[in-house]
Amino acid sequence: TDPDAPPHRRMSQILVPADADGVEVVRPIPTMGHTGRGWTTHCEVRYTGVRVPVENVLGEPGDGFRIAQKRLGPGRIHHVMRWLGQMQRAFELMCTRALEREAFGGPLAEKQTVQNWIADSAAEIQACRLMTLDAAHKIDGGDEARVEVSVIKFYAARVLHDVIDRAVQVHGALGLTDGTPLARMYRDARGARIYDGPDEVHRMVVSRRILKAFAAGDGWSFT
Ligand SMILES: Cc1cc2nc3c(=O)[nH]c(=O)nc-3n(C[C@H](O)[C@H](O)[C@H](O)COP(=O)(O)OP(=O)(O)OC[C@H]3O[C@@H](n4cnc5c(N)ncnc54)[C@H](O)[C@@H]3O)c2cc1C
């Protein structure tokens, strides 16, 4: 709303009623093979000559970036909390299938590769749990926990993908069918590395802050 303001003061957030004149939902945008429904639908929206009262601006003009950032920290850790549930579900399906399915003379659970997948998944899920609790603890203490939230955002997104991927592999062809929730979970997990900031941007945030602390002579302590 103000292209001449400093970069972080250029945007405003404006409430626009969905039934305002000139608002048009053009189409749901299909992603990874499904159109979504309800709150999971992402639509293309066209605004043509829409006018709303000035009091529909959230906060002050120029607050848009600040408001978005305020939501994004808690929003990102909330994503990770949901992913932890997905990881656990995939992990349980993987372990159950490994015990049930027999191939080449014995249960999959006795193959060392499958055992490695289970052990690696257990370690990584627990790491995600503890890092999430640590970030939440710091947020509860009044800290924005920018580094902790960014670390868990990109790290947990990868673990989510990897655990579901291993669970799909243990299920063989069954894992690709819609006979288990894994195929849907796998498709949804891909977005985790992109929405609310792609992995690369979170890594950039983390390394910038750490290097800034080093440059100031403070080093970095893992508390
Ligand atoms: C399922 C889903 C739901 C979403 N929901 C919402 C929502 O509710 N509200 C909302 O506002 N947005 C939403 N988004 C948008 C999302 O936040 C953006 O897609 C995301 O921030 C990446 O922006 P972009 O797509 O413009 O990618 P770009 O900015 O074009 O980046 C493309 C790629 O370039 C690379 N890249 C970008 N910057 C850097 C960098 N600094 N260093 C190195 N590499 C870089 C990354 O690999 C990145 O994936 C959603 C996206 C998805 C997929």
Image (tube, rainbow, N blue to C red):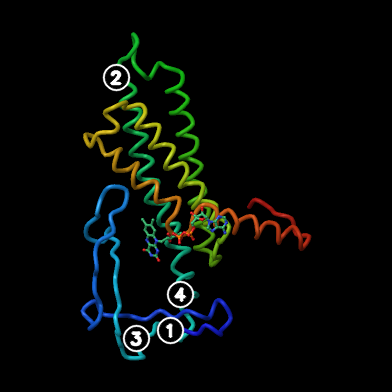
Work out whether residue 138 or residue 123 is closer to the camera in this orientation and state it: 123
Give the residue pinned by disc 4: 67
Q: CA distance from mark 2 to mark 3?
A: 59 Å
Label 2 vs 4, first from the N-terminus: 4
Q: Residue at x 76, y 63 (%)?
A: 216
Foreground disc of the pair 2, 3: 3
The answer to which image quadrant residue 177 occupies is: top left
Task: Describe residue 62's horizontal placement relative to residue 210 as left or right.
Answer: left
Q: Residues within 10 Å of mark 1 (few under 14, many from 20)?
A: some
Q: Residue at x 46, y 40 (%)?
A: 125
Q: CA distance from mark 2 to mark 4?
A: 51 Å
Give the residue pinned by disc 3: 56
Kindly indicate whether the residue at mark 4 contacts the one at mark 2 (C-beta within 8 angstroms). Answer: no
Give the residue pinned by disc 1: 59
Residue 110, compared with residue 60, is above or below; it is above
Q: Amino acid at mark 1?
A: Gly
